[in-house]
Amino acid sequence: MTDLYGPLREDGPAPLSPLRALAVGAHPDDIEFGAGATLARWADAGCRVTMVIVTDGSKGTWDPAADPADLARRRIAEQHRAAQILGAAEVVHLGHVDGELEYSMRLRAAIARLVRRERPDVVLGHDPWQRYQMHPDHRVAGWATNDGVVAARDPLFFPEQLADGLEAHRPTALLLWSADEPDHLEPAPEPYVERKIAALLAHSSQADTTMGGAGREPAAAGVFIERIHAWLATNGAALSGPPGESFKRLTP
């Protein structure tokens, strides 16, 4: 079906090679799961990678006795260690409360401001159209990223940003992870799979909640690593390519 609201284009199979990339995740570790190998590979090729974490991660535990403020501080530190492993240039924390993220024009404006400030070739984020996505923060962050990209490209959105010297900016592509119908593959050669896994394991507070005990138990770590490899292989096979991270690609 032709997109009546965007330029006609024909996507090829070639991976992207951006000079600047902006990735937006709802929580610490979301970006690593969705695009860690891709960002590490781009960073090694000279891309400036900026990671935006929308919430503080303060509810990311199954321990009812955990202190949310302590957990948030720990997760910020983990995120910065993970970013160093991937080679990211900057981490931006928007600081919304985990699990309580609500869609607002303020949130859309914050994403648009970052797009206009960083001027990325590629923006990456959660796919808000993913069916049966239960976590509300993932849905909201995905919508805010999509809508922030649209606002950033059109100069009549948020004119106060232009008054601050931030001109409108249109990225080349928006890549959405966890898509039901992915159509773009970024290959993940083994060295970058290792970086992706190392960055995920840097989020030690999430060993039980998202990684099945990996980081605490060698056997569990092995299972987790096998799961990541199997997932990347499945992504590649679905798009007739090598193991990699798959996305829905949109042209802003």
Image (cartoon, grey):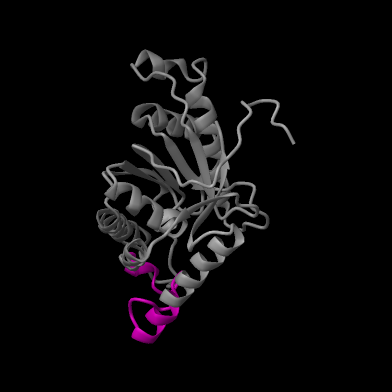
Whole-percent x, y for residue 222 in the image? 39, 81
Residue visible at 33% across and 80% down in the picture: 216
Whole-percent x, y for residue 47 in the image? 31, 41
- In the picture, residue 240 is in which quadrant? bottom right
Q: Nearer the viewer, residue 34 or 30?
A: 34
| Residue found farthest to the bottom | 219
Whole-percent x, y for residue 93 in the image? 34, 44
Residue visible at 45% across and 34% down in the picture: 111
In the rendered structure, the answer to whether residue 26 lies left or right of residue 78 reads right
Q: Quadrant of the C terminus?
A: top right
Whole-percent x, y for residue 196 in the image? 36, 62
Q: How many numbered marks are there?
A: 0
Q: Which residues are magenta?
A: 203-224
Residue visible at 65% across and 52% down in the picture: 181
Magenta-span inclusion, residue 205:
yes
69 to 122, vertically: above or below: below
Q: Nearer the viewer, residue 79 or 186?
A: 186
Q: Quadrant of the N terminus?
A: top right
Magenta-span inclusion, residue 97:
no
Residue 57 seen by the camera: no
Residue visible at 64% across and 47% down in the picture: 129
113 to 76, vertically: above or below: above
